[in-house]
Amino acid sequence: MTGERRRARALALKVLYEVNSVGHEVEGVVTRLLEEEGLSGGNAFFAQELVSGVIRNKETIDLNIRNLASAWPMEQIPMVDRNILRLAIFEILLDNKVPVKAVINEAVELAKKFGSDNSPKFVNGVLGSVSTLANR
């Protein structure tokens, strides 16, 4: 199950990255990547929920990133890291369906796979601050 959920999160990250970097339509990217990845029904739905949740709440999520990573202007945060943070902040602060530690662990794993050498530490640090907001 965890492997499938991780694949769903990776798919959501790929969708957000493509939409942000190239400007493709969300629905078309989601449809294409779901076909390519072959995720099961529940995990395909989970990936779609993540994407739509991040897009729907992007302003609120980005405000949290700006406040919690204030030393880094949004434009200077690599797009991969920014989208990993968006996914995790959506899950932690807005979705509340997965334990915070599990979300942070999954985000760090995505950062290891898709980000730079510094990404896991950066993502973990920002999400550590987010977790204090979630526990209030």
Image (cartoon, grey):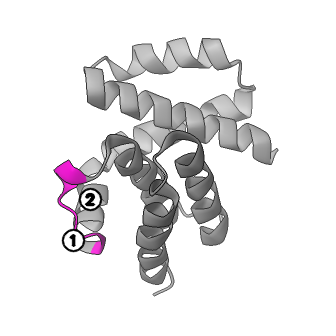
* Neighbours of disc 1 within 10 Å: few (<14), some (14-19), many (20+): few
User: Where does residue 9 sit, x and y in percent of width and height?
Assistant: 59, 41
Percent from the top left, x then y, of residue 36? Answer: 63, 13
Instruction: Specify whether residue 48 is in view.
Output: no
Sooner in the amino-acid sequence: mark 2 or mark 1: 2
From the viewer's perspective, is the residue at label 2 or at label 1 nearer?
1
In this rendering, position of residue 80 left or right of residue 1: left
Q: Nearer the viewer, residue 39 or 113?
A: 113
- Tag 2's secondary structure? helix
Q: Which residue lies at the image location 46% right of the left edge and 69% below the top edge?
A: 127
Query: Label 2 amino acid?
Result: Thr
For the N terminus, the quadrant is: top right
Q: Which residues are magenta?
A: 68-76
* Residue at 52%, 40% in the rendered image: 114
As drawn, 90 above or below 133:
above
Residue 41 seen anywhere in this rendered image of the structure: yes
Verify whether residue 25 appears in magenta. Answer: no
Look at mark 2 in the image and give the residue it sits on.
Answer: 60
Q: Which mark is residue 115?
A: none
Quarter holding residue 15: top left
| Quarter-of-image position of residue 80 | top left
- Per the image, the residue denoted by label 1 is 71
What residue lies at 45% left-to-right and 72% top-to-bottom? 125
The location of residue 68, given as percent across then percent down, is 30, 73
Residue 74 belongs to magenta span: yes
For badge 1, the amino acid type reads: Ala
Extreme residue in the right direction: 1
Compare residues 27 and 121 and report the one nearer the observer: 121
Percent x, y for residue 133?
42, 80
Determine the residue positioned at 45% across, 87% down. 136
Q: Secondary structure at mark 1?
A: loop
Badge 2 vs badge 1, beta-carbon distance below 8 Å: no
